[in-house]
Amino acid sequence: MTAIEETKGWLKNIVIQLGLCPFAAKVFYEKQILYNTIDFDHVDALSQLIDESIQTVLDDDSNYTTALLIITSGLTSFEDYLDAFYTIEEQLSKDLQDKHIQLASFHPLYQFEGTAPSDLSNYTNRSPYPIIHLLRTDLVAQAIKSYPDVQSIPTNNIKRLNEIGIQKIKELFNL
């Protein structure tokens, strides 16, 4: 199975099926997600792929409205991943691309600050590979306006994961 196939399975069977992101199903089933893979060896190569992906996602003639950059090797350490992620985020800000693109972060070892590694809340951002998600800010704003209580999403996700329990989550994540 390829990294893209694994990522699509994670989206369908975890993110969408568990309702972790109420906006994911539409773009997934309408094939509006651009999937790119990269073997990480330096942040400059990742930055170049992000720039290319941004151009595609912002292109009015493109069907893609969002992109997932799947890091197939390298950045296995969550700390190293965060360093690269923050470098990319800083570069977007310098280039003023952050007005058009927002980043989201996923990693197999994702850990929110102040939580234990085993805390179920971390699974809301755990993925089969390190992933940088590119979202168009205009579409994020539209989605937020259309959703009745966007602030409740993280709390509801944590509640749902706690209801499911660690055994079922480990099965879903093949751990």
Image: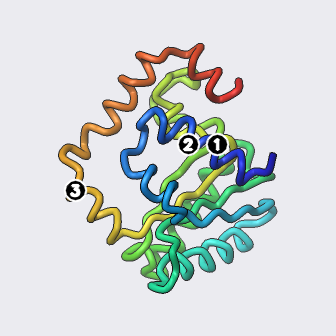
Residue beneath the point at 31% across and 39% down: 153
| Measured Cα–Cα span from mark 1 to mark 2 | 5 Å
In the image, is 97 to the left or to the right of 168?
Answer: left
Q: Quadrant of the C terminus?
A: top right
| Measured Cα–Cα span from mark 2 to mark 3 | 22 Å
In the image, is 128 to the left or to the right of 27?
Answer: right
Q: Which residue is mark 3?
A: 146
Q: Which mark is residue 12?
A: 2
Numbered-mark total: 3
Q: Which mark is residue 9?
A: 1
N-terminal of the pair, mark 2 or mark 3, is 2
Residues at marks 2 and 3 touching, judged by CB atoms closer than 8 Å: no
Vertical side of 151 occupied by 104: above or below: below
Q: Secondary structure at mark 1?
A: helix
The amino acid type found where label 3 is placed reads Ser
* Circle 3 residues within 10 Å: few <14, some 14–19, many ≥20: few
Residue beneath the point at 47% across and 17% down: 164
Residues at marks 1 and 2 touching, judged by CB atoms closer than 8 Å: yes
N-terminal of the pair, mark 1 or mark 3, is 1
Q: Position of residue 129 (x, y in %)?
A: 69, 46
Q: Position of residue 109 (x, y in %)?
A: 64, 36
User: For residue 6, what is the image quadrant?
Assistant: top right
Q: Position of residue 1 (x, y in %)?
A: 81, 45
